[in-house]
Image (cartoon, coloured by chain):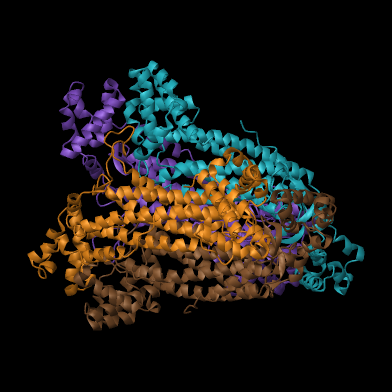
Chain colours: A orange, B brown, C purple, D cyan
């Protein structure tokens, strides 16, 4: 979608629509409009000559328009007079870009919906499956795997809303002529702009925005936010997939995740690709942001810095989304291993549960300190925390053995987990589907 | 607003509101709630001890809660049991941050309104003041200074909308306990969350978002978009203020923009500060974005990278806004010099106007090439373009001398300029004012 | 070291040295030099007035020089004539910065040496301690813990060399007067520069470098490279410290790494701080790099963007180094757990060893495929890989039972590990100590 | 040089050299080595199949080695056993990259030399050509154009040294097998490494550096430093080339810098390209830096983030260098216009010269204030500064009319300019030429 060929075709789409719009409102002859419109096809372009000329010209549009004019001239010399009438090269480049972005955003919207569905399925299916919550990369308290997925889903839902709202802000025509006044069309500029917006199904802005790139930067940052969440999901999956954790696994497949030398390997290749994307986006976004202060009516350098960077941002984020979709849809979940991992601390993961149970009687701080002491003892003596505690009179005087035992049952210490999962699932269903 | 003292006070506001909420719904005794709430005052905190302890503890909240507990204990040992009941340190840190952000966004909204008003005044006042449009840092065609200002205004209006919408997305409670289940409150977690949201006037999210930082990153990027536009304005002003251009000037003032060695200097100090801000934001944003993939239920490093970076983002963008407001409100505009600068190319700035006039008869490309040739001749022979053209039979046969002369009048080649200015002004007036 | 007070003192050190240098070569009266030099003390400065004036002036140096001039005038009006003689504010600001950097780099050099010593001790002590090597976050083959430490040491040694070489490139005088010609000193400029360089013990460059910031950017990137390695070490430690891995642990300490709610917690707080630093540096570096293209003889915005960013870069990297030193020196290593973790895959970690043993007879690819098949079978049937293999005739026909058993001994499959450790240790000892 | 084809060829070069090295030391049969070596040719590779398989495999090397093994097998099944013997895919990928980098650095070294020569020519030719120095984008004092060029040259010389030193640090073999122990080669690992280093003419490091990326990051930052200086040069040229300044101009050429609509345009297309490069590098560098903390023995995501980013860094910086070379070599300089621009301030540019002349008698501060007053008067009354000053008794009592007049001669206020130019030229000649 961001190949050179498509890039040129979208600029030609602009030129064709411009001709038709101008023909329609009578600024150029209808016959000319028709011939021009017909010749706006990327397959007629000599791409090699185009690349060569672009270096000297400073952009792709100028030599492309020359080629187009030549093509039209061969067919109808009169019509050739009206190619690119009233427009400037940036009009073609920016509007062409907006058309590419429209296509990309529809695909991204669709991808996000599928990721949302796949994550929602995990949240529902594992709504009551206990697993260790981990903070600072240390086991913390019990949770359910469905809540981890619900956290992912909650963020994905926000990104779906963002992508939807973004489309209104960014799918906007660029048409200002040489320097944003449309002076070459005299008093017909706005009329042509409106007709051109109709042709391309793009909104007509209050004025041309050649050197104001906040819309473009908005696109870049919104995609980066989404990719950041995908990176968070991949981070979680890769941590849970470690040999020593083994709670989830990327989908298996012939030739997938193997090693050139280690036969047992099944590497998290989708995680790697998604994490790589989430590490690349911030730098690419910073390029777009730092190129915003563009000079006067058309920038020098800043605009040019966007040309390779913006397509790359779309490619990288779109690629991450694609890998995430496939990874999540095929994720293998080992609920049994999750359960086992809750036991490897010999009860330490339940320290908060016990502390809270004692807090009401002992006060929060005393209970906390008692449990700190007991936890250290359990670790150094390699005992189960419940055994250490049972031997403390401060505990046994307050909790019966059965009460104490219950505090070491993850199912008894899940708080709002299932309610939270339900809330997130409900909200995710309220987002309307995109058009893709 | 982002001093250590305010940071701590906002976390204490969270602790106070938590106690009140829990007292209200009956999770802790009302009397305890009242004592705790009273002690949540930054002036009671020993900041030096806090800083020291924070290094070991890993964050500010843990030692702050210890100090608070001690303060409460001295007053009422029973109440001390219920300090920070059911919460985790990140709940206090993140919600405290959201409260700081709320204050900051209201100030920014107010600042943007004032910048909007000041820019609108320029757009209106110079709606018909001709000036050179410059593309690629070269004079291009005539425009009006009001259109330059309208371009700034158009972007500022979009930022006002963005800042407004952002508030709905970002002003959200963080409250999840140890790892996002609120398990320590058993089945009362959501009830407490709702009461806490009411106390703080913050929305209650579907679930706690400890390791999902897209809301924070959304704040960062939105501020960076705004600062990018301020940078663009400063870029334009600094270029127009160059000794050789002299069309605008930053407001004068005692001691302002002087040099330690050059007595004649009047440096664009506001431009420098704003441009510096627009160069700093992209890097700071990239930190926030690259720290998004946070591990599991609470991240390691990524979250910590936000702590200094986010306040800095708010400070830098807020500072830029403040300097922009003062610079634009006091901007000195030299309309006469703008007019003179239209003449320094000896007519070359009107080359497009002439080309378009000839295009209808000669075709666009032939006219373009003729003007290229004439422009080169005018430059090399240091003649006025109109004189060169008048000597060409291709021109004189098509344009009368008076017609040709009219093509060199900027007021005759402004296209949609005033219409564009009017459209932008109209839209800017539709944005409702903020609450600041 | 990068407080406002020190910043101002270093600029005053420049002014004092300038006066002495000019007194020495006879450009200003010796008596004036002496009075000026005496007054260059930060404790005489009114910092509040300074901050206020700096906003208008555009930098700190201009109002500081005014205050200094006033202080001198009170003592000796004649001497006041010669304050800041021939210099520009950037001379004071940049040279002051270089003096701060000199101090910082010596501390960093010392810190790196201590980190180097602590890491070298780990490499030596655990030179023969088997542990799992992990690639793509999956167990790969056996290695020794000492080799992991040697990898860290190898990189630290390179950073020691880089920091050393950097000092030669960056500890350079800035002295050019208004715009780099030293014209205000007529034909004495170079002579004063040389004397000034002697006073400050700084190299004199071929010409002033006001708008050429590659030296500054070199400092920033070199510190970021170092912090990247510290981040890699912290990443490794945090992964090995996970509850499910448990091979190393940050040093314990009263109040260290606790949680406000979970009594059993011992969080990797040093890792968090170091990783946060390594996430912040790239964005800060990008600010310095993107502000390099500074305009003409003194930049607008780019230079100003450095003012807060560069001290932050030094602080963040210096802080990371300090935390790393303390973390590594006190690192708790559990060699027994490392050994246990080698067994949790039921032999899969030895798949490469077996494959290589069979390769010579079966060919690399056939052996690889055989082991892939056996690994899948071991996993799905929860058997030990050696048992699976023993049942294959292709294996038993080629390897005796004792030969096969030996392939599952980590000590027999360590390759060059100890040689590599020794090589790195030897090189690390060749780096001369710094002056700190 | 960074096409997919070359990338694959360089990995094949690694495989060929590995086979030859292993054949030479007797680890694999000499005959096998010879067949393998012959098949390591990119033209034998099926690139489409490679791309498809790489997605699943997670990298290019794994499927490439499979194809290579197949090619060898067809020729000699026995030899196929020894393809990629003892190596891991990262060995091929990283060493292949280093080989590409070697080629690139030689080209860059050559390009820098040509830029150096072209800039040196400007510095020499315009060593005594007066021009305005500009600080904060305002005219400051007189300088010579040769000094501007000497500033560029001084930085270019430093980059030549950096690129030279970088080669020693970065042109290093990667060879560690599965996880850096070379265990699959038993006790022959180091011997093979040494032979392999000889084959490829690369240094052998103390140990494999799979997850330690400081060398790679060093390359990235060094290229960014260079590009930052090129950006500074382009910034200067673009400012001096503005319509209103007109002191220099990019080389002219058919189709160069034209506009699709404005016939008079001659846009600074090389400046735009170079500035775009200098805006892109910082973000790309930040990706490399933030991906440094790679996990354990091989990273997940961080390493993968390098794969597209590093080639892009080389391409972007190399492209900027190429454009700079051509721009500087053909730069048109208008010394006459430089002279004229010194006069447009009506003497204000000489304010410092006059102030210094009066300082010795009046004191620095009084003289400065007098000139501030006179400058304001000259501006507001549109008089020449010398006329304003001549009317002041404080001036006329101290300076004769002829003395005053001399202070307004740029040639009399150039300070060390020519000495500085000479120093820089001399140093630039001491740098030895590269091998390219």
Q: Between residue D296 and residue C389, name the one nearer to us.
A: C389
Residue A121 against residue B426 in the figure, above or below: above
Residue B46 against residue D142 in the figure, above or below: below
Q: Which residue sits furthest front?
A: A31
Q: Position of residue D419 (x, y in %)?
A: 77, 47
Q: Which residue sits furthest top?
A: D31
Q: Position of residue D172 (x, y in %)?
A: 48, 34
Q: For the image shown, how many numbered marks are present on the structure?
A: 0
Is C41 left or right of A342, judged from the image as shown?
Answer: right
Question: Would residue D356 be seen by someone viewing this image from the given angle?
Answer: no
Question: Would residue B177 be seen by someone viewing this image from the given angle?
Answer: yes
Residue D206 against residue B127 in the figure, above or below: above
Is C289 left or right of C131, judged from the image as shown?
Answer: right
Q: Position of residue B362 (x, y in %)?
A: 73, 51
Residue A386, located in which quarter of the rendered image?
A: bottom left
Q: Residue at x 38, y 63 (%)?
A: A161
Is D367 left or right of A253, judged from the image as shown?
Answer: right
Q: Position of residue D120 (x, y in %)?
A: 72, 42
Residue D323, located in which quarter of the rendered image?
A: top right
Q: Between residue B126 and residue B247, name the one nearer to us.
A: B126
Q: Between residue A245 and residue B346, name the one nearer to us.
A: B346
Residue A12 against residue D21 in the figure, above or below: below
Is B256 left or right of B37, judged from the image as shown?
Answer: right
């Amino acid at each position: 979608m961001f190949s050179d060929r498509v890039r040129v075709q979208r600029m030609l789409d602009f030129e064709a629509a411009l001709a038709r719009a101008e023909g329609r409102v009578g600024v150029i002859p209808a016959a000319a409009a028709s011939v021009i419109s017909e010749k706006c096809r990327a397959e007629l372009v000599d791409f090699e000559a185009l690349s060569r000329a672009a270096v000297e010209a400073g952009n792709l549009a100028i030599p492309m328009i020359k080629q187009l004019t030549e093509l039209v001239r061969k067919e109808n010399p009169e019509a050739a007079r009206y190619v690119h009438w009233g427009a400037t090269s940036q009009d073609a480049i920016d509007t062409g870009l907006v058309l590419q972005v429209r296509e990309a955003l529809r695909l991204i919207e669709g991808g996000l919906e599928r990721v949302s569905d796949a994550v929602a399925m995990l949240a529902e299916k594992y709504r009551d499956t206990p697993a260790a919550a981990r903070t600072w990369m240390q086991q913390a308290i019990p949770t359910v795997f469905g809540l981890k997925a619900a956290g992912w889903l909650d963020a994905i839902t926000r990104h779906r809303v963002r992508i939807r709202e973004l489309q209104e802000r960014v799918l906007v025509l660029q048409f200002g002529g040489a320097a944003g006044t449309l002076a070459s069309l005299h008093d017909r500029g706005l009329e042509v702009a409106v007709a051109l917006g109709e042709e391309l199904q793009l909104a007509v802005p209050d004025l041309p925005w050649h050197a104001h790139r906040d819309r473009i930067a908005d696109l870049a940052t919104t995609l980066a936010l989404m990719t950041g969440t995908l990176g968070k999901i991949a981070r979680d999956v890769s941590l849970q997939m470690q040999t020593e954790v083994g709670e989830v696994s990327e989908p298996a497949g012939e030739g997938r995740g193997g090693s050139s030398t280690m036969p047992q390997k099944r590497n998290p290749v989708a995680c790697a690709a998604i994490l790589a994307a989430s590490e690349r986006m911030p730098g690419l976004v910073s390029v777009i942001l730092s190129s915003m202060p563009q000079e006067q009516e058309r920038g020098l350098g800043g605009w040019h810095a966007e040309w390779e960077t913006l397509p790359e941002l779309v490619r990288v984020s779109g690629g991450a989304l694609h890998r995430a979709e496939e990874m999540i849809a095929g994720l293998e979940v080992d609920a049994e291993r999750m359960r086992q991992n809750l036991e490897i601390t010999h009860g330490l993961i339940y320290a908060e549960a016990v502390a809270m149970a004692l807090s009401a009687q002992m006060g929060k701080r005393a209970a906390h300190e008692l449990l700190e002491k007991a936890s250290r003892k359990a670790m150094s003596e390699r005992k189960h925390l419940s055994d250490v505690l049972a031997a403390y009179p401060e505990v046994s005087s307050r909790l019966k053995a059965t009460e104490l035992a219950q505090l070491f049952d993850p199912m008894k210490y899940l708080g709002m987990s299932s309610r939270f999962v339900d809330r997130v699932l409900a909200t995710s269903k309220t987002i309307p589907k995109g058009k893709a």
